Each structure stands twice: as structure tokens, then as C-alpha cells.
Image (cartoon, helix red, strand yellow):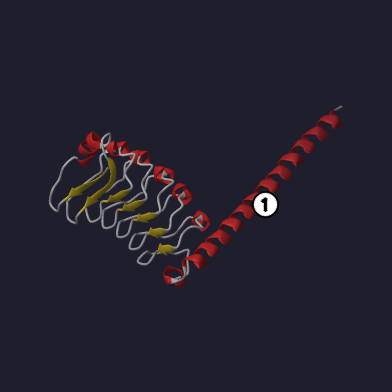
């Protein structure tokens, strides 16, 4: 039996405590909120909603997402648009069933590398404060829609903001490859220097002998 939790505009209450009481009797699939609920946060106990698949908390005053959200491992859709979020916890990357992540119109300054492990179809980061993106997003090959408009992106050409998602992913994968190649060159150089140092010490020892 499925159970949907509905909250109406202007009502504040501890939804997680109520939901967990029903979780053993019902298949809790949705926690849906109307606009303007004035919620300031999400309790840590949300992690107890392991069967939750749809979480809609848009248009509130939420400033942070608890790391315990990783316990909601059935989540397929998250809507956190129009809040006051400045960060996204890296633990969100553990939500292996997540297909839609809506974070538009917040105050995000970065997108965590750990969240690039998600198999998302839709990622909405529009209207935030992002100045760049992790190149690892290029590995999110399941993405069909990546929304970036309204960000002060400095590391991407403006054409990528509104261009095809696949073109952006390809560009980011290219950046990632360049970074990996550069790292390999630096490592090789360090190894050569270390070897030369060892040889130099050995030569001095032999000379003394």
C-alpha cells in the first residue's frame, strides 16, 4: 500500500517523525510540499525514510541538507529549488537511484565531485552562484538535461550555458583527460628527480669509499 505525505502552505511540522511511524505499515513514496511553507531546515531523521522515492521541498527557506539524506536510498526525484542552499553534502552521491536533482535558484557556489557519481537524467543548477563546474560531471553520461543558465560561470564559454548537454559533457571530459595527463607528467617528473637524488647520494658514498 502506498502512502503520500502532503503538507499545505503555511504549515510547519515535524514530518519525519510522523512518516517513520507509518513506514512499517506503508510504502512511503512521496513527501510533497506546497510553496511558501517557510521551512528553515530538514531534520537529520529524514534518513529514516528509506522507502521514499519523491522529495519535494521547493520554495522554502532551507539553508542546508543533512548528510543523513544518504539513508533515503530509494530516492528517485529531489526538488530543492528556490531555497537558501549554499552547499550540497557529498553524501548525496550515495543515492544510486536518483534520476532528477533540482537545485535551481539557490546560492550554490560549487557542485561536489562526489555527486558526479550519480546516474542522473536531469540536473538543474540554474540561477545559482557557480563560477565553475567539476570536470567529473563529464563522466555523467546518463544526463539528458543539464541546466546552467543564471550562473557566473568563468571557466565555460557562454554558449555552453544554453547549448546541447552532450556537447558540454564532451568538453568537460576533455578537461578531465587533460588534467589526468598533466598529473601523470608531474608524477613521472617527480619520480625522475627522486631517482636522480638517490643516484647522487650513491655516487658520493662510492667516492668516499
Q: Is residue 27 above or below residue 9?
A: above
Residue holding disc 1: 185
Residue drawn at x 20%, y 37% is 18
Q: Is residue 29 above or below residue 141?
A: above
For the C terminus, give its image quadrant. Answer: top right
Q: Position of residue 177 (x, y in %)?
A: 60, 57
Q: Position of residue 41 (x, y in %)?
A: 24, 44
Judged from the image, the secondary structure of the residue bearing numbered disc 1 is helix
How busy is the neighbourhood of tag 1: few (under 14 within 10 Å), some, or many (20 plus)?
A: few
For the N terminus, give its image quadrant. Answer: top left
Residue drawn at x 37%, y 64% is 151
- Residue furthest top as drawn: 209
How many discs appear?
A: 1
Task: Classify residue 148 as left or right of residue 29.
Answer: right
Task: Classify residue 106 as left or right of residue 197.
Answer: left
Q: Quadrant of residue 199?
A: top right
176, 54: nearer the viewer: 54
Residue 84 seen in the figure = yes
Q: Position of residue 56 (x, y in %)?
A: 27, 52
Residue drawn at x 29%, y 49% is 55
- Residue furthest left as drawn: 10
Task: Classify residue 41 as left or right of residue 87.
Answer: left
Residue 61 seen in the figure = no
Q: Position of residue 71 (x, y in %)?
A: 36, 38
115, 106: nearer the viewer: 115
Amino acid at each position: 500500500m502506498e502512502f503520500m505525505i502532503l503538507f499545505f502552505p503555511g504549515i510547519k511540522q515535524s514530518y519525519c517523525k510522523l512518516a517513520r511511524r507509518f513506514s512499517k505499515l506503508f510504502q512511503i513514496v512521496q513527501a510533497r510540499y506546497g510553496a511558501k511553507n517557510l521551512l528553515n531546515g530538514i531534520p537529520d531523521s529524514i534518513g529514516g525514510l528509506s522507502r521514499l522515492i519523491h522529495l519535494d521541498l521547493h520554495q522554502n527557506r532551507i539553508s542546508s541538507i543533512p548528510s543523513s539524506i544518504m539513508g533515503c536510498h530509494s530516492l528517485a526525484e529531489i526538488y530543492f529549488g528556490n531555497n537558501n542552499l549554499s552547499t550540497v553534502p557529498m553524501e548525496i552521491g550515495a543515492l544510486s537511484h536518483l534520476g532528477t536533482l533540482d537545485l535551481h535558484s539557490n546560492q550554490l557556489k560549487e557542485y561536489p565531485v562526489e555527486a558526479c557519481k550519480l546516474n542522473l537524467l536531469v540536473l538543474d543548477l540554474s540561477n545559482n552562484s557557480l563560477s565553475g563546474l567539476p570536470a567529473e560531471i563529464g563522466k555523467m553520461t546518463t544526463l539528458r538535461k543539464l541546466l546552467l543558465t543564471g550562473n557566473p560561470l568563468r571557466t565555460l564559454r557562454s554558449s555552453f550555458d544554453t547549448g546541447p548537454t552532450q556537447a558540454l559533457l564532451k568538453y568537460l571530459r576533455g578537461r578531465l583527460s587533460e588534467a589526468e595527463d598533466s598529473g601523470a607528467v608531474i608524477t613521472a617528473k617527480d619520480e625522475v628527480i627522486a631517482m636522480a637524488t638517490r643516484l647522487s647520494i650513491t655516487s658520493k658514498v662510492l667516492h668516499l669509499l
